[in-house]
Amino acid sequence: MTPKSSLEPSNPFARASDLAYGLPPFASVREEHYLPAFRVGMQQQLAEVEALAQSPEPVSVATVLDPLERSGALLSRVYRVFFNLIGSSVTDGLREIETEVNPLLAAHRDAIVMNPALFAKVAELYAQREQIADEETRRLLVRQHDDMVRAGAGLDAAGQERLRAINQELARLASTFREDLRADTNDLAVHVEDASRLDGLPPDALAAAHTAAQDRGLRGYLITLLLPSGQPALASLTDRAVREGLYRASVSRGRRDNAYDTRPTLTRQVALRAERAALLGFPSHAAYVAADQTAGDVDSVTKLLTALVGPAVQNARVEQAELTERLHADGFEGDLRPWDWAYYAELVARERFSRDSAALRPYFELGSVLRNGIFAAAGGLYGLHFVRRDDLRGYADDVDVYEAFTEAGAGLGLVLTDWYSRDAKRGGAWMSSFVSQARLTGERPVIVINLNLSRPPAGSPTLLTLDEVGTAFHEFGHVLHGLLSDVRYPRLSGTRVPRDFVEFPSQVNEMWAWQPELLRRYALHHATGEPLPSDALDSVISAQSYGQGFATVEMLGASLLDQAWHGRGADDPAITPEQVDAFERQVLASHGLDLDAVPPRYGSTYFEHIFGGDYSAGYYSYLWSEVLDADTVEWFLAQGGLDRKAGARFRDELLSRGGSVDPMAAVERVLGRAPRLEPLLERRGLLPVD
């Protein structure tokens, strides 16, 4: 029996929200509400789990899986709100709570997955799995059993005690990495007082830099940093010295021997992950991760990545030679530097494709991209439409709430949009959930999409770069994966699929950003409403394949760094913080990726995906998923593009199924065959095109 909550009635987490779809009551939540809700939530779930573990009822889906999936409702409510705000709108108070609660949560999870009575019941049911006819239930059972084994349920007491200690320390280290990176990123924003030094920066970007400086009480302009090595302003700033300063600021994050240096944190994480893998019977953390993904093993990952290196480097060197000629034509001697690449690539694209990125920005206004592009694509494919709910409040003043409806007019869920960067927000772009769909609990999705756009001055439009347009479509692909989920169990809902599959639907959704039929609808001049001229539209489409040598090399660099860090065994000599930079250079050189002008997309010290997030040993997922994505894009185009019938097939066979079906089998049902590698090679210029 669930114990009575000891939360004060005034605590908004004490009961399920009565707002639409269970939207959290953000206006009522105060910092002092979190810790009590976490503590009581953990206490309640442990009592629920112990009750089912000790129940004398015969083992069955109804007595084990269903109550386990229902357990922890209070903890889930507070967890979702808290950790979404940690990423989007952190405060000093929230950081203090995170420091305290992360080890408690790690210990709480261990107490459940290592509960011997619970594991005995799950194992007994697992032995009967072939008798379960329902595929989703059977997959949940296998998932639950495997999760417990992988979490140490089969270890002896000493092994479990050590594993608990490792998990708690890793939880603390991830928080430390994220916070140090956020602080160093803010500290390294490039301050420029003289506007003439920012020549080439588009007017709206210049205005945003002025606003950013004002927000910090500074004169002039402030160029804030995004998460990757490359920064958008590098493509337009004419002052080479300013470009160099911006680039060096970006890649120096976390490695300046200051209070925010992330090297001690990441090297400790690497060592602990290797030790944990060894405890669980794996040669490395990379092997531990791959065994639970669609890749299956490290060799499959390595085979894909290394097969792409040679052609990608060859293409990048061809691009580099061309850009070096342009550098020399401008009167500069020597080699093309990493702060030059984006600038001269933009010049070449402007000449070759008549594409002027700065001149295109007025046609990519955020509101039109959202309404006439992203929402319109979801309507054309899946019959969805979206209505802004001004009566519902997000967690910040600039977070809007939209209700999604099916073609028949039934409410589907909520989507919160958080577009702008702020000092209290982590870098990058992502989707997350406040509520996940599950028929077992009767819950429907409440999803948030986050970007880090520069905020324009009040009253000015938000104009996007082409990269930002693609990112918005990409993240909305994750939103659709969660929004269209139709499964019974929370554990299998939406994006809760293997990590190397989760990027596939989002990468497919990027395709619609560049389809002519949709571009004509959303690429409208923000002031005149005129559509993007046909020649400019053609240039945007044709230029999508340009620069793939650089793009592939930087992705491979980051992916292979991730594999190298996490391919280390527990007995390998420890890498000290002082050796991090040398280790990076050695890894890149060993794969032939030591191109000075093409840095990895993320350096180790600011690689939040793997040291602050949940992508450790999994960054390869983007390229792995792109194999499926490129083939699926060809399939969609063969069906006629924004076709409702094709959308229904993709939704019914894949998007709506979450983790309830085998993901590769779902892809094959969509395509009608096994996926092929050739479309990816062709897209990235790694295969001769007839």
Image (tube, rainbow, N blue to C red):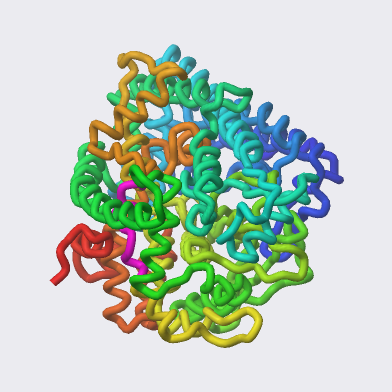
Residue 676 vs residue 685, the one in the foreground: 685
The relative height of residue 532 versus residue 101 in the rendered view (above or below) is below
Name, please, the residue furthest toward the front. 331
The residue lying toward the viewer, choosing from 489 and 373, is: 373
Secondary structure predominantly adopted by residues drawn in magenta: helix
Who's the residue at 65% across and 46% down the image?
A: 425
Q: Residue 375 in the image: x percent, y percent?
A: 55, 75
Q: Which of 107 and 586 is in front in this view?
A: 586
Against 139, is 564 above or below? Answer: above
Across and down, in percent, residue 277 comes to: 36, 25
The answer to whether residue 688 is left or right of residue 100 is left
Magenta range is 543-554
Question: Is residue 149 left or right of 205 when viewed as pictured?
Answer: left
Asked if residue 106 is positioned above or below residue 657 in the image, the reply reads: above
The answer to whether any part of residue 141 appears in the image is yes
Q: Residue at x 29, y 60 (%)?
A: 628
Which residue is rendered at x = 55% and y = 77% of the image? 363
Instruction: Provide residue 167's location: percent of width, then percent of height.
Output: 50, 25
Magenta stretch contains residue 13: no
Left or right: where 75 falls relative to 548? right
